[in-house]
């Protein structure tokens, strides 16, 4: 899927500098950053849900009956 990402001048320059430092294109750098952030978010969500389920096991067991 194609999309347009509008960045401020400061954001564009930060992206350009980071991509150049890594030796990759701005697109590749942005895509990698998005993947890293979404994986981090998913891990945080999963950790929360595991903790919630463990802390509320009794309630969840009663609700499942």
Image: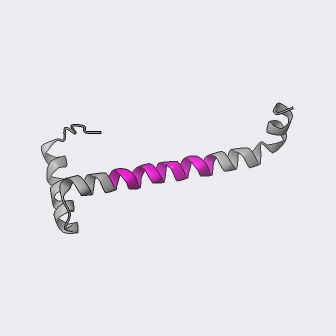
Query: What is the quadrant of the C terminus in the image?
Result: top right
Q: Quadrant of the N terminus?
A: top left
Residue 43 location (% of width, % of height): 54, 53
Question: What's the residue at 82%, 37% (across, down)?
Answer: 59
- Residue 56, located in which quarter of the rendered image? top right
Which colour style is shown?
one colour
Query: Quick check: 50 above or below 6?
Result: below
Q: Position of residue 58 (x, y in %)?
A: 84, 41
Q: Please provide the residue range marked out in magenta.
A: 33-48
Image location of residue 19, percent across then percent down: 20, 61
Counting the numbered discs, the total is 0
Residue that appears at 48% across and 48% down: 41
Seen in the picture, residue 37 relative to 56 is either above or below; the reply is below
Q: Is residue 59 left or right of residue 45?
A: right
Residue 49 appears left or right of 37: right
Using residue 64 as the reference point, say whether residue 29 is left or right of it: left
**Residue at point 62%, 47% (across, down):** 48
């Amino acid at each position: 899927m194609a999309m347009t990402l509008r960045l401020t001048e400061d954001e564009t320059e930060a992206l350009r500098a980071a991509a150049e430092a890594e030796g990759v294109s701005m697109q590749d750098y942005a895509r990698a950053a998005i993947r890293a952030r979404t994986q981090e978010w998913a891990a945080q969500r999963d950790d929360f849900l595991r903790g919630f389920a463990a802390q509320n096991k009794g309630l969840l067991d009663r609700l499942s009956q």
